[in-house]
Image: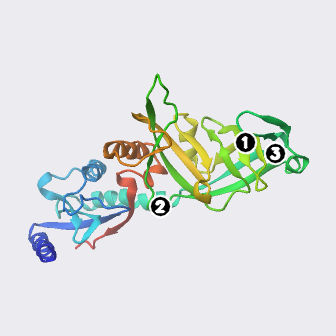
Amino acid sequence: MKIFACVALLVMGVVMLYDGKQTFMTLYFQEPISLENSFEIEAAYLQAVRQAMAPWPIPAGKLELRLEPGNRQALQVRFAKDALDAGQRQQLRALFESFEPAREEVRPTGRLLVDMRQARQVGLGVYDFGPAPAEVVALGEMSLALHFSFPSQIDVQLRRNEQATAQKPQADMICEASARLNGALPFEVTDFNVSGADLRGEMKLRMPSGLQLRAPAQLSFDEQRLLERLEMGDMRVRIQRPETIDRLVFEFGKIGTVRDQPYLFFIRSDPEAFAACRAIAYQSGRPFSFYLGEGLDRLLKVRFAPQG
């Protein structure tokens, strides 16, 4: 198998020398862009690159998009020397150079306001035990700076919405993804799920002492594109602490129904549903498209070949 791969790479190199095309740039993506154990590039990436290059049409026989030898995350854009003039090459270069700065401009920060002056002590279910103790009320309006990040190996997750009944045996399938909060909150959020223009709602939380409270809270983000997307109302965000780590969970919406299975909240294997979820996440725009799905926003860097 290794011998076959080496021979294939050698043949590719020879062909590249004599096909009349030059490598203009190599695009390096965040994830593999080819099918496993194959030189075939995923259709979504081919389509995205061709669509981006559409303003500078190159005849099919003079353009080639291929994997960089030995690297499933790199796409070479090659075309004939006379396919574009100097001005067109510069415009094409400027377009692809714009992706890396756009990724670096993402502002993964925000703020959580919790008004402890109005906090009330609660128990299981809907029990309300009255105003919170004086030491909690004395905390006033807590203003907590948030810094979050999307893990390098982030992927979407599919959650069963707990709404199945005898009359409705199917549960909604919810598409979502998590970002990690850098630094623990001074309490555990047990329920806070908001959307809309002001991201305001009632928060249920547990203090380190074990005291359970509910209080008015509001979430805000410094990333304007993210804020605008949430303000549209068809996306939601919640805070939760699975496995001792606080997370922001962004909910992109319902993508269908699935058979209800009590106590199994997450769907582990459904390739078509996961593909649909990744597509929805990417279509939700930046910053999500920098980390989820398939397309040009998954581009990490570009290397331009010297032009002779």
- Name the residue type under label 1: Ala
Q: Which mark is residue 217?
A: 1
Q: Residue furthest right?
A: 134
In which quadrant of the rendered image does the N terminus lie?
A: bottom left
- Name the residue type under label 3: Met
- Name the residue type under label 2: Pro
Q: Which mark is residue 101?
A: 2
Taking the image as shown, residue 33 lies to the left or right of residue 22, namely right
Residue 51 % position (x, y): 28, 47
Q: Residue at x 53, y 45 (%)?
A: 250
Dot 2: what SS? helix
Q: Residue at x 51, y 58 (%)?
A: 150
Q: Nearer the viewer, residue 74 or 263?
A: 263
Dot 3: what SS? helix
Q: Residues within 10 Å of mark 3 (few under 14, many from 20)?
A: many
CA gap between label 2 and label 1 equals 34 Å
Residue 163 % position (x, y): 51, 31
Cβ atoms at labels 1 and 3 below 8 Å apart = no
Q: Residue furthest top?
A: 167
Disc 3: which residue:
116
Q: Residues within 10 Å of mark 2 (few under 14, many from 20)?
A: few
Residue 217 vs 13, above or below: the answer is above
Q: Nearer the viewer, residue 161 or 64?
A: 161
Dot 1: what SS? strand
Residue 304 % position (x, y): 31, 69
Closer to the N terminus: mark 2 or mark 1? 2
Closer to the N terminus: mark 2 or mark 3? 2
Q: Which circle, 2 or 3, is nearer the viewer?
A: 3
